[in-house]
Amino acid sequence: MRTAPGIAPAQRGPILVILMALLGACDEGPPPPSLATPGQPRDSIADPRSNEGVYERNIVFMTAGADSVIVVPWLFRASTTEQGVERSAEGWLAHAGLWEPFFTDHWDSPPTRTPFRIHARDPMDLVVGPGNVIERIVFQEGARQLQVVLGEGMSDWTGNRGETFRVHRGAALFGNVRVEGMVMDMNRARLKDSPAPGEWMFLTGPERLAIVIESTGVSPSHTAWGRRGDQEFRWPEVEVEWTSVRSFEEARRDVPVAWTIRSIDGDMEVSLASTGMDLQAGVGEGPLLPINGLYQVAGPLIMSGDTLDIRGLVRHVQR
């Protein structure tokens, strides 16, 4: 875990105490009903060839319009092989510029025709409603309990490669404390030999503002969708520029700490700066190693002539 720029090591203790108190402040009520293997989400990409599919699903809670920003991303990945399905799941909590991983696991499951389905993995469980729609993700370990609740759908967007992004009203439950916000539910699927998509961003702000930006892996390299009030927007092509970088020695690469995102039509421009990051170097044969990173970001958005303050999450990827 790395501190946010501008946060001294001496400040870590109180912030981490608050984070763990949020996770630990639970009552001892009965756990909600659950299914061990949830059903297929409606927006899953159907049946890539056996042994060649890579499936990514990310479900992210974020406060919207609140003074204190809390982000809870759940990141799921599945890759099919001749032996079965290689799976991974990560749960993170971000608050006050710090990232805390509270769940991570990697495991294999038997061959299946539905490898895209998310599987529960103790102490992470899933609550599934009618139509096999995931209604909440539950983490409960001892006295610690955290739930991400997917509520009413607000927006539903589909990319050129079949990827889908749904934005819901939602909440995070820290024991018996409920925090309102938004939840993004994102699905991407591809064949292993196809171009890999890259980073993505989920941004929120006032007036029920939500923006999703994706690196597609193909042309155009970045695209974006947005919602403000009852209006929806699609920016088929956006330019993403790193306006400030720092060295990440473990991977022997530079990583961004500030971004400018502009739509080609000039209708939207975002300036983002990191307020806290966690970077992880992967394994590789060359001198430059792959990177997976999570950022809390904030900055001004100019859209349709208005300026709004936004915050959000950047999932940074360098392969």
Image (cartoon, helix red, strand yellow):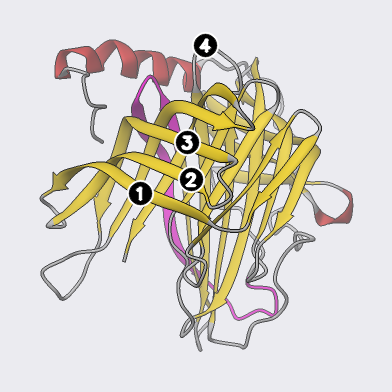
Percent across and percent down for residue 170 are 71, 30
Of callouts 2 and 4, the N-terminal one: 4
Q: What secondary structure prevails in the magenta region?
A: strand
Q: Nearer the viewer, mark 4 or mark 3?
A: 3
Residue on which the image places disc 4:
67
Q: Residue at x 66, y 41 (%)?
A: 226
Percent across and percent down for residue 134 are 74, 48
Quick check: can you spot residue 119? no
Number of marks drawn = 4
Of callouts 2 and 3, the N-terminal one: 2
Measure how far apart labels 1 and 3 are at the Cα level: 10 Å
On residue 262, the disc is: 2
Tell me whether circle 2 and circle 3 mark residues in contact (CB < 8 Å): yes
Using the image as rendered, state which of residue 219 and residue 153 is in the foreground.
219
Amino acid type of disc 4?
A: Asp
Q: Residue at x 56, y 75 (%)?
A: 190
Q: Is residue 217 magenta?
A: no
Magenta extent: 92-115
Tell me whether circle 1 and circle 3 mark residues in contact (CB < 8 Å): no
Residue on which the image places disc 1:
241
Q: Residue at x 44, y 38 (%)?
A: 92
